[in-house]
Image (spheres, grey):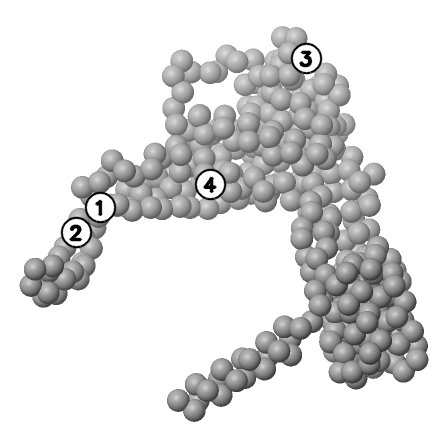
Amino acid sequence: MRRIFFSILIVGLLVFVFGCSTSIPVIVTKPAEINMSGNRVIAVLDFRYPVKDKTFTGKDLLEWAISKLTGLDIPSEMGVEQKVGDYTTSQVILTLLNTGYFQLVSPQEVARAMQGGISSSTTAVDIGKAVKAQAIVNGELYLLDTKDQEWIEERKITDASTGEEKTVYVPMIKRTVWVGMTYQVVNTATGNVVASRSFQDEASTDRELANKRDLPDVEDMYTRLVDQFMPQMAKQLAPYQVREHRTLMRDKTKDARMEQANELVKGKVYDSALEIFLNVWRGNANVAAGYNAAILYEVTGQLDAAIGQMKTVVDATADSKAMREYNRLLTVKHEQERLREQQQ
């Protein structure tokens, strides 16, 4: 009992010590993984679905996507694989369009622009000229597979009338699907692949065998996994925003000015709070004041000043938390440099 009491006491103290730190929410724009600054007008071509016993290279995929623009290889009845392939193409277009970073050209628009001039010799360069696209995005679903597996599940139940526990054996069925997707970015000025990425995942669900009809449709399970790939693809190709928090350091000196500045931060009066933190830091090298001034420099968009201020704190105090924040700020600066390149 005493051990439980002390555990609760320690947790309470930790909440008191760390729970009172002021946190500032910020919206941060992050650079994409791939620099697409010179490839922002994109023609999206059809994504291929798996073909048994055949593997496609990047060049093969592009040739297939171009040939599909003719519409000659469309079967009279679409199977699940082709439906999921078409769904993937439409989701890629929608995902890239929703980033607000790209101008998109659909496969149908490419076909119209080519005006029937598509042949086996058509290249990415030809498409780029026809629709004024800087790049082509296409790819394939290299894996679409499903498996239903039956087994017997042992359950313990209590008889409602007698209260006795007994064992029952329930036939079960599990449906698992696997989806693998790859895409490539082809520059239309050179015809070269400038980036290529892949995703793969699986999903499963089970039911009692007697309720097998309640299992989700295979096509629906495929498309849900495709949907999960789209946010990742967006972050790879376009800058994106995230919500983060910057936490101030708690003051241990009981300086009334520090409390005043903290209240100003809570009221979002950042400039006035920054001025107070700087005055306290310059007056007595209060580590919390210097640290918080650097954080407020960052929050108010003065990243270089934030880095300089935090380095001053590190040099003067060797504070480990300030050192971690200094390294984080350097990483932020590098990210912002990449972001500026991508926004040109």
Q: At 80% across and 65% down in the image, what residue appears?
A: 264
Which label belongs to residue 208? 1
Residue type for callout 3: Ala
Residues under labels 1 and 2: Cα distance? 7 Å
Depth check, mark 4 against mark 2: the one in front is 2
Residue type for callout 1: Glu
In the image, 303 versus 171, the foreground residue is 303
> Residue 131 placed where, x, y %?
72, 18
Q: Is residue 280 visible?
A: yes
Residues under labels 3 and 2: Cα distance? 59 Å
> Residue 128 placed where, x, y %?
72, 22
Q: Are marks 1 and 3 in contact (CB under 8 Å)?
A: no
Q: At 43% across and 85% down in the image, what residue appears?
A: 4
> 175 left or right of 300?
left
Q: At 18% across and 59% down in the image, what residue appears?
A: 155
Q: What is the quadrant of residue 191 in the picture?
A: top right
Residues under labels 4 and 2: Cα distance? 29 Å
Helix, strand or loop at disc 4? Answer: helix
> Which residue lies under the disc numbered 3?
113
Residue type for callout 2: Val
2 w.r.t. 58: above or below: below
Helix, strand or loop at disc 2? Answer: strand
> Residue 8 placed where, x, y %?
49, 82
Helix, strand or loop at disc 3? Answer: helix
In the image, 86 versus 4, the foreground residue is 4
- The outermost residue toward the top is 116
> Which residue lies under the disc numbered 4?
225
Which of the two discs, 1 and 2, labels the residue nearer the N terminus? Answer: 2
> Which residue lies under the disc numbered 2?
170
